[in-house]
Amino acid sequence: MLGRMLGAARLNADTFEDVEHDRGATLQALAVVIIVAIATGIGGLLGSENDLLQGLGFGVVRGVLLWAVWALGIWLIGSTILRTPETNADWGQLARGTGFAQTPGILSVLVFLPAGGLITLAVFFWQWAAMVVATRQSLDYTSTLRAFFAVLIAAIPVAIVYGLVTGLLGIGPTVTPEGG
């Protein structure tokens, strides 16, 4: 699993091909998502007064839910609207690839540092790039741009689910009328 995580972090297309075809890697992909959610939760909660265990629990549930929704969205968009003659994939293939694509998120454990904003931005773009490579390989695209748009379009329902989950559970960033 660690080798696959490193390959995913290096945006190695062969790694994503490997996990795409290994049905046994679905639990590994889930483990990656959970590890990243825990790292993100720890980084976000360090130095705060929030309850660590509650924050981690909600973070893991949110992370797994968003991963499943995003994989489903990419699969639906990528295998219908953006389908090519070569496209042949199921949800599991997308789930495995996009799960491993979350690997760079482990660095979110460092967001409490003074450069936390830059770390968050770097992790976001790195994960996005990994999602695009995972999508390209899982949907058998020859075009990275097509994969980019599949990820982008699928991000819309993910953003909606994220808003609902964080709103209903009362977690995530809060903004007061004063902007603080």
Image (cartoon, grey):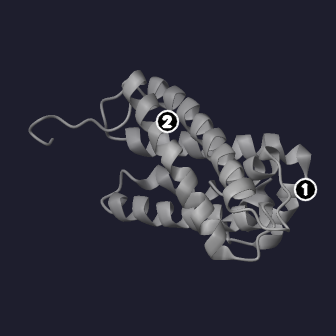
Residue 25, compared with residue 147, is above or below; it is above
The residue under the point 62% across, 60% down is 150
Residue at the left extreme of this rendering: 178
Marks 1/2: CA distance? 28 Å
Query: Relative to the observer, which residue lies in front, 127 or 3?
Result: 127
Q: Say whether disc 1 or disc 2 marks the residue closer to the N-terminus.
A: 1
Tell me the SS state at disc 2: helix
The residue under the point 83% across, 54% down is 89
Query: Relative to the observer, which residue lies in front, 17 or 141?
Result: 141
The disc label shown at residue 21, or none: 1
Tell me the SS state at disc 1: helix
The residue under the point 66% across, 53% down is 77
Q: Where is residue 45 in the image (x, y as percent from the top left)?
A: 39, 38
Residue 159, compared with residue 116, is above or below; it is above
Residue bearing mark 2: 161
Residue 14, by quadrant, is: bottom right
Q: In front of the other: label 1 or label 2?
A: 2
Query: Relative to the observer, which residue lies in front, 114 or 135?
Result: 135
The residue under the point 72% across, 41% down is 31
